[in-house]
Image (cartoon, rainbow, N blue to C red):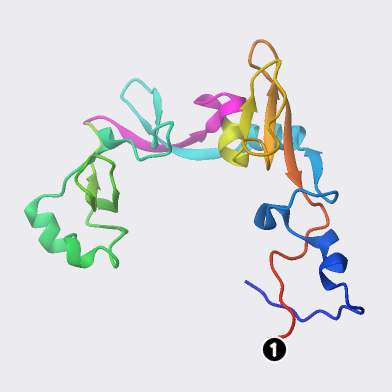
Amino acid sequence: MSHFSVLVIGSSVEEQLAPYHEFECTGKDDEFVREVDVTEEARAEYAAHESTYYQDPEGVLYPRFTPEGEWDQRFWRDPTPEEVEKYKLGKAGILDQRSGGEDGVEWYTTDWKDGSGYRAKVKCLPEGWKEVEAKDSLVEGFAEFAKDWYGSQVVPFGEEPDLSEKHKYGYILVDVAGNVVRVIDRTNPNKHWDWWQVGGR
């Protein structure tokens, strides 16, 4: 994070700084916000981007996360009492041991959304499975990738974007078959600040 001193001449500080606000932080949807078509950029990223997947013995790839963005619990187990002791995975070690690995054992601490609260689990791939790096395009469609990459939602075919809420910061347009037509990023191309204050230095 960087802080800068800026000289603004005149009394209308807010008005003079307005053209340079970072929309993604201020949320102020004004005349300085533009709809930028990033479709080609997104397609290039989709073609090149790789992620970590789990591969079964037949070569089928599985994402590490569920569609809701949670760790897929099929690949995690509760640690044994010996692992809890050896790697300090109990409640007392949560902050220091959020994630880690040692002796071929990998663990991660989070709320696993299973009603048992915030705790560590150990990665446990089924026999014959392995962790691999693979192109995202082998596993998910372009629309799904664009949603994850830009944090935007698809506008159902025939509907208008909801710029006040759901599609405020961007959206994905699709045709009747669900194919991506355009990926739009709503931003202020001249953004320079996310907050400011008079004085304080």
Q: Nearer the viewer, residue 164 or 56?
A: 164
For the point 75% across and 48% down, the residue is 29
Residue lying at the far bottom in this picture: please name it.
201
* Residue 97 placement (x, y as % from top left): 28, 63
Magenta stretch? Answer: 127-144
Quarter of the figure with residue 38:
top right
Helix or strand or loop: what does disc 1 sit on?
loop
Residue lying at the far front in this picture: please name it.
11
- 176 displayed left or right of 79: right
Residue 141 in the magenta stretch? The answer is yes
Q: Nearer the viewer, residue 17 or 61?
A: 17
Q: Nearer the viewer, residue 60 or 74?
A: 74
* Residue 131 placement (x, y as % from top left): 36, 38
Quarter of the figure with residue 46:
top right
Residue lying at the far top in this picture: please name it.
177
* Residue 60 placement (x, y as % from top left): 39, 22
On screen, residue 159 above or below 19: above
Q: Which residue is mark 1?
A: 201
For the point 41% across and 37% down, the residue is 132
For the point 23% across and 48% down, the residue is 121
